[in-house]
Amino acid sequence: MHIKPTPLQHINEPLFREKGVEVWLKRDDLTHPDISGNKWRKLKYNLVEAKEEGLSTLLTFGGPYSNHIHALAAAGKLFGFKTIGIIRGEPSEEPTDTLQNAAKNGMRILFMDRAQYRLKNEPESIESLHVQLGEFYMVPEGGTNIYALQGCIEMVNEIKTDYDYICLGCGTGGTLAGVVAGLYGKKKALGFSSLKGKDTLTSSITELVQDFTDKTFDNWQITFDYHFGGYAKVNDELIDFIKAFKQNHLTQLEPVYTGKMIYGLYDMIKNDQFPRGTKIVAIHTGGLQGLCGYKKEFENEIQN
């Protein structure tokens, strides 16, 4: 289970030169066409653990547009696992592109109503799934657990250039936790949250890092200033920014994580929140299949 290290792309911008800040983009979107970015990093050692436990079926949870569902289905097909996706909500007459692709990759799609879904991690709910579906290896929603951190640390270790900050978008916080664990108190990490819940996200990352390293670190923080109203919320300003970035740098972002992170990074640099001479590596965490959730409303703006 090996994918070659992903490259660094220098982002040449007049703004960055004016402010004396250097920015590189780690192109983790190039890991694999279907298992890209942080999803591969988070899945890798979960797949290893499942094999070591002798389990041939992977079960996970997600929404109808979930990058994680998409990636797990592809990984299952590639590495010989059966996969089951428990999807939040009710089935629709026309499944999303994400769920259609997951099904094409062999994933068994089951739906769970929102009330049940909120209790999905309770022991009674998990036992009920085992009774219904048999033995399986459970990967948490979003892929965030201790094994995910191990894969994300490898991403940090691949960065050979000198830098002061690693910046990345975050949802469940697993990738940021892995970056913090990989830095081990050196350099700085800055997460750009796509969610509003400050206390929950910060505490869960702290707990993950502590469980993995037996230490706590103060060289990281999360900004909640660029979520654009919450998870998967967007506006014309963000869409225009993504379009301009693609035109200027020949690199596609998506509006849930990477678009918000890069937008926020530009804004912080513009407002002198990094001192002159700062070197930044921003992580492109992939997730471009998520664009399918915006194709009707944003097709002209994003996918041209």
Image (tube, rainbow, N blue to C red):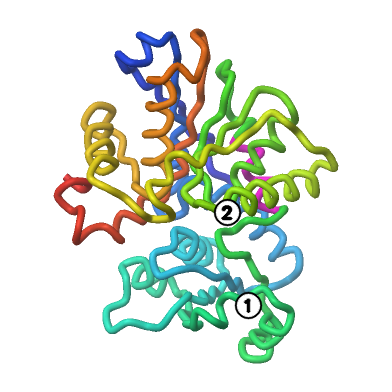
**What is the tally of numbered marks visible in this picture?**
2
**Residue type pointed to by label 2:** Thr
Q: Is residue 8 above or below residue 78?
A: above
Q: Which residues are magenta?
A: 147-155
Closer to the camera in the image, 170 or 228:
228
Q: Is residue 179 left or right of residue 280?
A: right
Q: Residue at x 63, y 65 (%)?
A: 139
**Which quadrant, please, contains the C terminus?**
top left
Q: Residue at x 51, y 63 (%)?
A: 72
Q: For the residue labelled by badge 2, is the local secondary structure a helix, a strand or a loop?
A: loop
Q: Is residue 149 left or right of residue 251?
A: right
Residue 251 place in picture, x, y as percent: 31, 35
Q: Earlier in the sequence, mark 1 or mark 2?
A: 1
Q: Quadrant of residue 51?
A: bottom right
Closer to the camera in the image, 267 or 142:
267
Q: Quadrant of residue 263?
A: top left
Q: Is residue 33 above or below residue 183?
A: below
Q: Residue furthest bottom?
A: 132
Q: For the residue labelled by badge 1, is the local secondary structure a helix, a strand or a loop?
A: loop
Q: Is residue 185 left or right of residue 250?
A: right
Residue contact at pointers 1 and 2, CB within 8 angstroms? no
Task: Tell me the distance, in whole angstroms, between the alpha carbons under discs 1 and 2.
Answer: 17 Å
Closer to the camera in the image, 271 or 159:
271
**Residue type pointed to by label 1:** Leu
Please name the residue that numbered disc 1 is placed on.
Answer: 119
Instruction: Characterize the magenta stretch by its predominant secondary structure.
Output: helix
**Mark sitting on residue 172:** 2
Look at the image and say whether residue 188 sits in the magenta stretch: no
Residue 128 place in picture, x, y as percent: 67, 88
Q: Residue at x 27, y 48 (%)?
A: 235
Q: Is residue 236 above or below residue 299?
A: above
Q: Residue at x 41, y 41 (%)?
A: 258
